Image (tube, grey):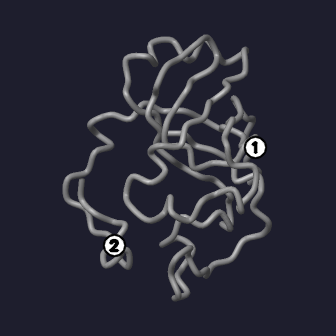
Amino acid sequence: MEIKFKPIGIVHSPFRKKEDIDPSLYSNSVGFDRVQGELEIFKEYEPGLKDIEGFSHLIVIFFFHKSQGSKLETTPFGDDKIRGVFATRSPHRPNPIGLTTVKIIKRQGNLIKVAGIDMFEGTPILDLKPYTPRDQKSSIQLGWLKDRKEIESK
């Protein structure tokens, strides 16, 4: 079965390459929350943004366009153990699809200024979904991340 996606927009980010990401952003649970950028939705999809201003956050589904190849095991940033790729946020996946949640600052036409950018400049956006109470989980288990200092309850 062949599956095809067509980007609906692109990300504008301060991150051009991996080295642009300051490791201190990983040092606490809100590191990336202060990084701002823009989601540019292509004009043909702008009507789909109607009523988006009423939401505080968006879930962004994107393509890891800079990922090269996939690995079923990887060593996550700041860790020294090999983990299964499905237990990590690694971009080196069998299907290089990413998911992140960003805070909406404001919308101007087809541009959405957001905070919480953790994607590279030019990242293709595949879809947007509003973050809703259904997405909030009060009782979660953090697996191997539970002992990491940057994972703190807010």
- Height in image: 148 above or below 112? below
In percent of the image, x 76 and y 40: which residue is there? 122
Q: In the image, is 35 to the left or to the right of 150?
A: right
Task: State the image quarter where residue 61 is shown.
Answer: top right
Nearest-to-viewer mark from 2 and 1: 2
Question: What is the total number of numbered labels drawn onto the structure image?
Answer: 2
Q: Which percent across, then down, holds residue 146?
A: 31, 74
Residue at 24% x, 59% y is: 153
Q: Is residue 48 left or right of residue 40?
A: left
Give the camera-side residue of 111 and 7: 111
> What residue did someone put label 1 on?
4
Residue 115 left/right relative to 70: left
Residue 82 x %, y %: 55, 87
- Answer above or below: position of 24 versus 134: below
Viewer-nearest residue: 145 or 20: 20
In the image, what residue type sits under mark 2?
Answer: Lys
Residue for badge 2: 149
Count residues near mark 2 (Cα–Cα under 10 Å), then give few for <14, some for 14-19, many for 20+. Answer: few
